[in-house]
Image (tube, grey):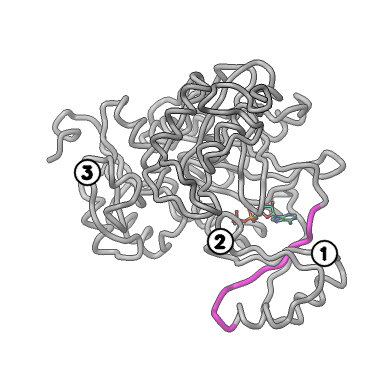
Amino acid sequence: MDAAESKNLPVVGMIGAGQLARMTHQAAIALGQSLRVLAADPGDPAALVCADVRPGAAVDLAALRAFSRGCSAVTFDHEGVPQENLRALVADGVAVHPEPGALLHAQDKLVMRRRLVELGIAVPPFAEVLEPGDVAAFLAEHGPSVLKAVRGGYDGRGVWMLDEPDAPLVAQLLAAGTPLMIEQRVAMRRELAALVARSPFGQASAWPVVETVQADGQCVQVLAPAPGLPEERAVQAQQLALRIAAELGVTGLLAVELFETDSGAVVVNELAMRPHNSGHWTIEGARTSQFEQHLRAVLDYPLGATTPTAPAVVMANVLGAAVPPVMGVDERMHHLFARFPDVKVHLYGKAERPARKVGHVTALGTDMAEVRVRAALAAEWLSTGEWSDGWSAHAGMREEANV
Ligand code: ADP
């Protein structure tokens, strides 16, 4: 029996020990709990900080079974948990949230799109790809498109923009056993995300709809609320996410990634059923963070209030720089705190590698444009050790003011 069990408080087990588990652990502490994590590597972000770390991989059913024993609920911080393993846990009587049948829609892009079509929910035109000719036929009908791995893609890996049919690429991917689909490239204004939570009891809650700013297929900033999104559209997007959560039987968090098309309509791009990068802002920016809400939801506790704490909140990811900065991260933190005492920093305990998400920063305020500049400067500084607006850390002033 571990410490939390002995206090008669629940134990949530999270399969995976990345930064999402690390931040969920932080929320668990306040609820009197300690997250149990299944860590593939002892150096994983959550394995570095949790008290209850079980070594093992999500593909190893024996490790999953041992891990789940004594857990009040089992959930995950990534989608790479084989369906058959989750179903075996359910058959053992483990409370898996979300249940495997719901999770499948976050694991398989084709299953998800077919289901949403059945529900009458808008997705871009798409087709399964079984041979290179399928891509050529789709492009002839729909123009520039996006080839996607049906399973296992993340942060733009597993996504290929195609203007022309690229038969060698498609043949190579199929030969390697990658299931593929193709989708029309959407002419869009921007990307949005609607984050909701739903408990087994059926209670649900939604945070304000956010804009997710992308670069190189990866989210770099989240603006909460999405600037200029009419109230009516925001409510529609929240209702869409709540409906998907209810229809698919999601328990825990559901992030619905959306494209806002040039005409202002929204189409669904992707579903995630776990804490999501588009919700990191809620740690400081909402009354209840996504991490606490996920725990509440999988434990069937009543959900927390999602009210924002400021009119404008911006989260910016700290990505490993292309060229590692000469200045160590500790010194970068000193300078950041000196310049922006109000910006909150979250570092994940990961080694800095190019484009790798190693942390994030959050800034709050009243004017979105101003808050965004502050968050962007802070994240860029932590990433590269350079102030892109020419601020001189040593002089404490702008360099041009020195000449
Ligand atoms: P991942 O699973 O790697 O996050 P996504 O399917 O979300 O992959 O695609 C990554 C990014 O590629 C999206 O955030 C978006 O910027 C771009 N993208 C994906 N699908 C389309 C599309 N149909 N039209 C235009 N851009 C797209």
Q: Mark 3 points at which residue?
A: 52
Q: In this view, does 115 lie above or below 48?
A: below
Task: Kindly identify the residue that appears in the image at 51 percent across and 57 percent down.
Answer: 104
Residue situated furthest front in the rendering: 403
**Disc 1 on helix, strand or loop?**
loop
First in residue order: circle 1 vs circle 3: 3
Q: Which amino acid does label 1 sit on?
A: Pro
Give how far across and how far down residue 320 sits, in percent: 50, 49
Foreground residue among 399 and 348: 399
Give how far across and how far down residue 33 sits, in percent: 26, 31
Query: Which image quadrant for residue 144?
Result: bottom right
Q: Which mark is residue 153?
A: 2
Task: Kindly identify the residue that appears in the image at 59 percent across and 30 percent down.
Answer: 375
Query: Which image quadrant for residue 112?
Result: bottom right
Q: What residue type is labelled 3?
A: Asp
Foreground residue among 126 and 135: 135
CB contact under 8 Å: marks 2 and 3: no
Q: Mark 1 points at which residue?
A: 144
Q: What residue type is labelled 2?
A: Gly
Q: In this view, does 299 lie above or below 40?
A: above
CB contact under 8 Å: marks 2 and 1: no
Give how far across and how far down residue 281 sits, in percent: 54, 30
* Residue 22 appears anywhere in the view: yes
**Disc 2 residue: CB within 8 Å of ligand 1:** yes
Foreground residue among 107 and 167: 167
Around disc 2, counting alpha carbons within 10 Å, would you say few (fewer than 14), some (14 to 19), or many (20 or more)? some
First in residue order: circle 2 vs circle 3: 3
The magenta segment? 175-186
